[in-house]
């Protein structure tokens, strides 16, 4: 019982230290682009380069219409994927990267996960503003749906819980980090990021219907396109939140004290 209480206390204390990880996350993000010419605009440049390239390949090369027809779908998909799936590589390396800090200062494990996610959120919001500007210039933008304000926290909570779940075995077994890296690459192609979910028909339907990352992606992409997410996406998002939350608490209960010895 004490171990369960300690697990919940770890989660609560992690959020209580928000002023610390908010400040540290901002400073680390700023330091990443220090002494560069474009600074944080490199994030935007990467997003736009991928979006234009995939729009050209998917639209012109594959014969799926003009590149403008798919650009809004693709650029929002790439952007939303950052907090719906691609963060998993960073998550698997969270405790390993924070090893020196964990050995010198006693902080909740959740603190390190929240710090990692906050840096991803900063990148997401910076690129979100740039994306809207580009879509307005191209006259492809739509007024975001208000459901985005509810969908984003749901996706972030799922991402935090999943990060805790992945970071623990990745600290104990270093091969997990390598396997997560190429798994994310595979997920990028089988998740409807740069192709519409409607193309997954017949035998390909499970790529969307049974793919939790597809539902989390659509939960935040559809509001950015001006649409309200379907009920099934809300059901998956909320259901996963409880499932991953219970799993994260269980793993914190069992392995929280061992992490420092695995570094």
Image: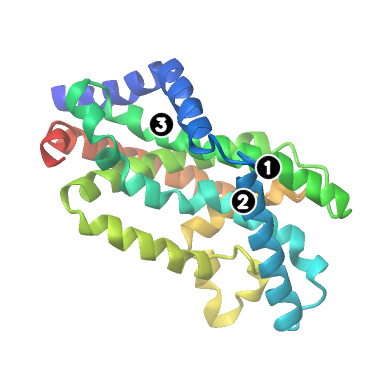
The residue that label 3 is drawn on is 114
At x 36%, y 45%, the residue is 91
At x 66%, y 48%, the residue is 44
Snapshot quadrant of residue 70: bottom right
The residue that label 2 is drawn on is 79
Residue 151 visible here: no
Mark 3 and mark 2: Cα distance apart in space: 20 Å
Tag on residue 196?
A: none
Q: Quadrant of the C terminus?
A: top left
At x 33%, y 19%, the residue is 13
Callout 3: SS: helix
At x 59%, y 38%, the residue is 152
Callout 1: SS: helix
The residue that label 1 is drawn on is 128
Callout 2: SS: helix
Residue 146, x across and y down, in percent:
73, 36
Tell me if label 2 and label 1 are in contact, CB under 8 Å: yes
Residue 218, x across and y down, in percent:
62, 54
48 relative position to 160: left or right:
right
């Amino acid at each position: 019982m004490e171990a369960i209480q300690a697990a919940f206390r770890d989660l609560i204390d992690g959020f209580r230290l928000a002023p610390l990880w908010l400040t540290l996350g901002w400073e680390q993000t700023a330091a990443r682009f220090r002494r560069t010419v474009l600074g944080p605009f490199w994030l935007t440049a990467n997003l736009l380069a991928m979006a234009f390239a995939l729009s050209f390949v998917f639209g012109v090369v594959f014969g799926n219409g003009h590149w403008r027809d798919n650009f809004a779908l693709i650029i929002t998909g790439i952007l939303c994927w950052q907090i719906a799936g691609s963060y998993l590589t960073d998550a698997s390396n969270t405790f390993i990267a924070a090893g020196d800090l964990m050995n010198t200062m006693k902080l909740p494990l959740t603190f390190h996960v929240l710090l990692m996610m906050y840096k991803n959120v900063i990148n997401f919001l910076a690129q979100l503003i740039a994306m809207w500007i580009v879509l307005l210039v191209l006259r492809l933008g739509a007024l975001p749906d208000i459901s985005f304000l509810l969908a984003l926290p749901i996706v972030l909570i799922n991402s935090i819980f999943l990060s805790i779940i992945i970071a623990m075995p990745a600290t104990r077994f270093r091969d997990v980090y390598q396997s997560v890296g190429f798994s994310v690459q595979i997920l990028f192609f089988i998740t409807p990021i740069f192709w519409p979910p409607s193309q997954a028909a017949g035998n390909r339907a499970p790529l969307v219907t049974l793919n939790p990352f597809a539902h989390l992606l659509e939960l935040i992409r559809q509001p950015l396109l001006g649409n309200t997410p379907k009920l099934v996406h809300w059901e998956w998002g909320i259901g996963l939140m409880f499932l991953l939350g219970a799993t994260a608490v269980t793993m914190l209960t069992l392995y929280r004290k061992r992490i420092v010895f695995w570094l």
